[in-house]
Image (spheres, grey):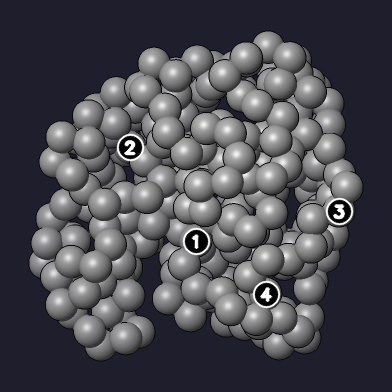
Amino acid sequence: MKRGPAVAGQFYYGDAVRLSDQVRQYIDKNAKKERVIGLVSPHAGLMYSGPVAGAVYSAIDFPETFVLLGPNHTGLGARISLMESGEWEIPTGMFQIDETIACKIAMSVPLVSRDARAHMFEHSLEVQLPFISHFTKKAKIVPIVMLSASVDECRTVGEGIAEAIKSVNYSVVVAASSDMSHYVPENVAKQQDRKAIDMILSLNPEGLYETVTRQRISMCGYLPATTMLFAAKALGSRSARLVKYATSADVSGDYENVVGYAGIVLR
């Protein structure tokens, strides 16, 4: 099964040449690249979140496979949905699904449903692909989107992902797609986002989940980020670094209703 681009021409340019030029302006050619276990990257329109996403992907050694975890904005499909086979197309490349890892996750984690419907119109993972395509045409993906989950379910899924990764002999990065606070004044966004970012930097998935839910921080991908943290810890992650933080006000000039973007790598 091939999934065509759902948000080309909306979140990013739908023409390959223009998209390549668009992504290139957000790449840091001087960034020191490091091997990472996990990462957090935003998924808004590239004109807003591109500088942060570009900084994150510029800072990593590229693996053979990305396990992509994102929020389910559309409400379609199962609560936790994995597309286990096929390919995803964007204007600048075609991505094969890593069926080896996808099948291992599907077999060992009953919470994860084999469900392509949830992915058909969802943008949170698709918006990562132009950056990955800029650096490599060979990387495979394992797409998973999350609609709802308890912290214990995030742990189960994250540790199941880690076990699947441990079973293969090639490099894999777990990438959580998330924007931070939504449509609040910039001073509020920065204050609230810092609380969530600090939990990620301290490798505290339970703390992230609790902080976001109790303080009602409008971080759309806290479930993917929590799950990624559990996976990264099971894979031996010992530290994290905030690569870049920004808000939509940097582009829009509207400081009363901003969306926050954080780029983080875990080693």
In the rendered structure, the answer to whether residue 20 lies left or right of residue 219 reads: right
Pointer 2 local density, CA inside 10 Å: few below 14, some 14–19, many at least 20:
many
Gap between marks 2 and 1, in whole Å? 18 Å
Visible residue check, residue 16: yes
Callout 2, which amino acid? Ile
Circle 2 residue: 200
Gap between marks 3 and 4, in whole Å? 15 Å
Dot 3 or dot 4, earlier in sequence: 3
Give the mark count: 4
Q: Which picture quadrant has residue 188?
A: bottom left
Callout 3, which amino acid? Lys
Dot 4 or dot 2, earlier in sequence: 4
Q: Position of residue 128 (x, y in %)?
A: 61, 58
Label 1 residue SS? loop
Circle 3 residue: 2
Gap between marks 4 and 2, in whole Å? 30 Å
Dot 3 or dot 1, earlier in sequence: 3
